[in-house]
Image (tube, rainbow, N blue to C red):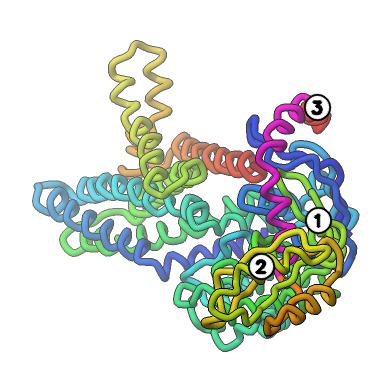
Amino acid sequence: MSQALLIARRELAAYRRSPLGAIVIAGALLIDGIYFYWKGLTDKLVSAQVLSEFFYGASGTTMIAGIVLAMRLLAEERQTGTLTLLNTSPIKDSEIVLGKFVSAFGVLALMTLLTLYMPLLIFVNGKVSVGHIVVGYSGLLLLGAASLAIGLFASAVAKSQVVAALIGTLILAPLVLLWAVAKAVDPPLNRVLTSLAIHHENFRPFMNGILELDGVVYYAAVTYFFLLAATKTLEARRWR
Amino acid sequence: MIEIRDLYKYYGDRRAVGPLSATIEKGEIVGLLGLNGAGKTTTLRILACDLLPTSGTVRVGGLDVVDVPHEVRRRIGYLPDTPPVYLEMTVDEYLTFAAKLRGVTGADVEKRVDEALELTEVSSERDRPIGALSHGYRQRVGIAQAIVHKPEFVVLDEPISGLDPVQIVEMRDLVRSLGGEHTVVVSSHILSEIHETCDRIFVIRDGQIVASGTEKELSEALLSGMRVTLSLRVGQAGAARASQLIASVEGVTQVELAAETEGPGVASYRVALSRDTRDELTRAVVGAGFGLLELTRGERELESVFLELSKSSDEPARKKKKRKKPAAEPSAEEAP
């Protein structure tokens, strides 16, 4: 466990020194801000709707940020040969994966919290419940964790960062679009597909300030599954 | 002690190493010498638990690399062919990270980092990012990383490649200084780089050890006779005559006129003797009226042994490969 923290600390320092972390955060804030101004502040909506719109927009940037932040985690080490240092050290693959995940999640959480000024702006001319804000942010963090896990798995599979980003997108995008597929198929299959979709029905309750256990379990499961897959990928490759 | 028994490594159908057996004593510095693709890196990676052997046993300090890899990893320091350094970290941060990664804890970390920095002479650069260092310094940081946890065994894959002459001398001293306390395995494809550093040399070709021993043992066992270089003042047209004269001396098996020369009228010959007939040789040339300027025993003797060992590989090796494969497969099945 302490080894996982060691990896996480090194990784956080790497985010601080490379421009990637700053660029992702700045980009996400810019896009969130524009979206918030365009959808939230110019349409005639009530306060709660403005907040929902904000979470909807932020969910998109969170997913993209998750993939971009995670793409370098293992692929870069493989590219530069530093993975050998980890592979020849007495450290478990699960500790490597966990450490990497925790550090990237830290950056993503910072990015998400920096958007807090937008919901607070609603208080200037309106009123929303604090519970709605808290639930919405929980949803964003859960969705972000799942995207990061997908990106980390892609990074474990890929030889280069670009390929990692591509693979991550190719896993995430279909998961988002499952709800559209669900519309086209008959019950009961459509129910299955809808509940597997990473955004739509699993995220909407969070967006509207309703905390549903289904969603929490879903995101936790997706995160666990892809972190496990990343660990197994590393294990399978470690001695090759 | 490192014990390797009947080690094989296949990449798909291609045999990279095997059959390979060797024993390396505690505190010894051993050089693995071979051309590119001979199987040096593969062998070292297996020692460092970076690569799983196809079959055979490798025991490092009595511990099997397949059964207890983490225990072996704790006791071994490994420098791959490219130093596994994070370019954005400073030397200090990097070594601290590497030490903690190998299980060094508490106050020991700082002490060990200081020692490693001192030994590899990078203390002056400790606060600089590794990305800003020259190739030679990065290589040293790579070695510092391999010894920072005071491992019993140090495995260095071509630590000398790409260094300038001054750095090569320093690197030799550094590797030399690791002996005794650590058991060191170094690989190289250039003999002169390691024969001074190592207690013993394994010549590896086509995944097998074709010769081993100290430099002296190797040259005694493999060099019949002796090689000398002879510089003579031969005048304007005497070069060919001198060559004939040398060839007629008893024991001379080969005479070769060297391309380099000290100046006009001076010729150098590389002479192969079947036994030590240097006195006859000098008497003959002096008696014939040539000025004897220099007679040196060839210092590149072992180099030529190595070249011969490596060159003769081509034909028989390929035949051997085909023959070896069926024989190796049963042992590959035994592995799991």
Residue at 31% of width from left, 43% of height from top?
Answer: A208
Please, what secondary structure does the residue beneath circle 1 have? helix
Q: Quadrant of residue A123?
A: bottom left
Chain letter, disc 1 residue? B
The mark nearer the N terminus, 1 or 2, is 1
Tell me the element at label 2.
Answer: helix
Is the N terminus of chain A in the top left, top right, bottom left or bottom right quadrant?
Answer: bottom right
Task: Using residue A197 as the reference point, say whether residue B78 is left or right of it.
Answer: right
User: What's under tag 3, amino acid-wise?
Assistant: Ala
* Mark 3 element type: helix
- Front tag of 2 and 3: 2
- Label of residue A184 in the image: none
The answer to whether B132 appears left or right of A125 in the picture is right
Query: Is B103 a magenta residue?
Result: no
Where in the figure is residue A81, as x and y percent of width and height? 54, 56
Q: Dot 3 corresponds to which residue?
A: B327
Q: Which residue is labeled 1 in the image?
A: B71
Q: Callout 1 environment at 10 Å: few (<14), some (14 to 19), or many (20+)?
A: some
The span shown in magenta is B300-326
Q: Earlier in the sequence, mark 2 or mark 3?
A: 2
Residue B319 belongs to magenta span = yes
Pick the quarter of the image with the C terminus of chain A. Answer: top right
User: How far apart are labels 2 and 3 at the CA level?
Assistant: 51 Å
Q: Which mark is residue B243?
A: 2
Which amino acid is tagged 2?
A: Ser
Residue A142 shows in the view: no
Is B44 in front, or is A78?
A: B44
| Residue A150: image location, x then y, percent | 45, 41
Q: Note whether B34 is above or below A156 in the view shown.
A: below
